[in-house]
Amino acid sequence: MVFNIRAHHMADDNFKVVCSKQDIILRKNTEKQNAYLISFQAHATDEKIEQLQKKHLYQLIGDLCPDIILKNKVTALDDGGHSVMFLFARIGKELGLSQKCLYLNTYVETNTKNKLVVRGIGPPASDINSEYDIVNAKYIDMCVNIDENKLVTLHFSFHLDLNEDLPSYMQDLPGLLMLKILMGLKKYIEGTV
């Protein structure tokens, strides 16, 4: 696996597989709590590749998952980046978990015909005014490679803290939530949505 973003977080011996569904692999960092890596490959049509290159990926992800992401908003920042907001459906209501909202500032590091790298960090808490509980995003980095055979390889490295005291059987909820969201993106790329 070739992927340089947060390479110091991604040595294979530091990650264990949490879930492998629909040819998408979710790995958890065994040394850092709430740090995950999701990877998949999908064959795309020329039309899907063009849409991936033209549309803001977080806007696309939000649009593809209305059952999980109730509201998404992407706005341009003065420094060339984008502010992203996802309001999640209430998960774990029966366990007393509150509704969550994710805020992220994203910056395109590389954008060529065959590669897109987007780095994201959570904005300072003082910049957030929300009526919902905030998901703390230390980082969310995405790398999309497209080869000459239209094979799309996506690596999604992230650190999310739901700011909840979760029972042990729910410790991987942040990773599983993002896995479900990226399943929608994979289906879209493959044209099965």
Image (cartoon, helix red, strand yellow):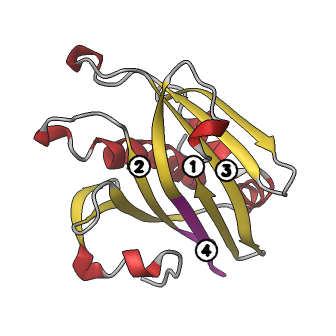
Q: Amino acid at mark 1?
A: Gly
In this rendering, the label closer to the viewer, 2 or 4: 2
Q: Which residue is mark 4?
A: 145
Q: Could you tell me if residue 23 is visible in this image?
A: no
- Counting from the top left corner in percent of width and height, residue 147 is at 63, 79
Helix, strand or loop for disc 1:
loop
Nearest to the observer: residue 3 or residue 124: 124
Q: Alpha-carbon distance for marks 1 and 4?
A: 24 Å
Helix, strand or loop for disc 4:
strand
Q: Which residue is mark 2?
A: 160
Quarter location, residue 177: top left
Q: Which residue is mark 1?
A: 122
Q: Amino acid at mark 3?
A: Asn
Q: Alpha-carbon distance for marks 4 and 3?
A: 22 Å
Which label's residue is closer to the chain start, 2 or 4?
Answer: 4
In this rendering, the label closer to the viewer, 1 or 4: 1
Picture residue at 48% right of the left edge, 33% below the top: 134
Which label's residue is closer to the chain start, 2 or 1?
Answer: 1
CB within 8 Å, label 3 to label 1: yes
Which label's residue is closer to the chain start, 3 or 2?
Answer: 3
Specify the label residue 69 is tagged with.
none
